[in-house]
Image (tube, rainbow, N blue to C red):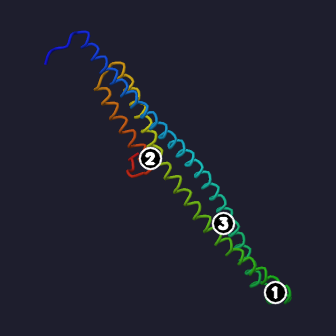
Amino acid sequence: MAELPEPLQNAAEEGADKAFSRRVALMTAVYAVILAITSLGGNNATKEMLLSQQQASDQWNFYQAKVIREHQYRALALRLEADLLERGPSMRPEARAKLEELRKKFAEEEKRYSSEKKDIEKDARRLEHERDRNRERDPNFDFSEALLQIAIVLASVSILSTSRALFAISTVFALGGALLGLNGYLLLVHLPL
């Protein structure tokens, strides 16, 4: 094959460089879109983690209030039971009946608070699980964002230097970032952090 004259050869190289630059610029835009999606996932995971933690804390406070009330009613019922044992024979029948009625009411209230706190505990544990899941998702998004930002910088530098090797490296970083971002959404692999 005959060699091209120098001006034609330069034009062919410039055309190839422009095609390379356009390809890399397009891929850089794709990296930026993936980065935006990953950033959105990371922000949402953080917000959901904090919200779940706050809601779980509220539920545990509510649970603790129910436990305190349960114990108060238990203590009142036990106190009335002791009074009935101690003073029962010497009490008037209507006073004794009233104390018996109060003791039963306090025992019922104790049972009610005991059963109510179980549902609250279940809800608090569910919220803690949600918090933990979002806490596990978050580092995936953080590492994904870092890798995608590095990929964008390397791709930009590869355009300036017309370096296909730098573009290949940026593609590896972008692929790693995309996989971590996807893992942030799906949690297929648990990061050992």
Badge 2 amino acid = Gly
Earlier along the polypeptide chain: callout 2 or callout 1?
1
Residue 68 vs 90, above or below: the answer is above
Q: Residue at x 32, y 35 (%)?
A: 172
Badge 3 amino acid = Val
Mark-to-mark CA distance, 3 and 2: 38 Å
Residue 70 vs 26, above or below: the answer is below
Spot occupied by residue 155 in the image (x, y as percentages of width and height): 37, 27
Residue 1 vs 183, above or below: the answer is above
Mark 1: which secondary structure? helix
Seen in the image, is 86 located left or right of residue 11?
right
Please name the residue that numbered disc 3 is placed on: 67
Badge 1 amino acid = Ala
Please name the residue that numbered disc 1 is placed on: 97
Seen in the image, is 64 located left or right of residue 131?
right
Earlier along the polypeptide chain: callout 3 or callout 1?
3
Mark-to-mark CA distance, 3 and 1: 28 Å
Position of the N terminus by quadrant: top left
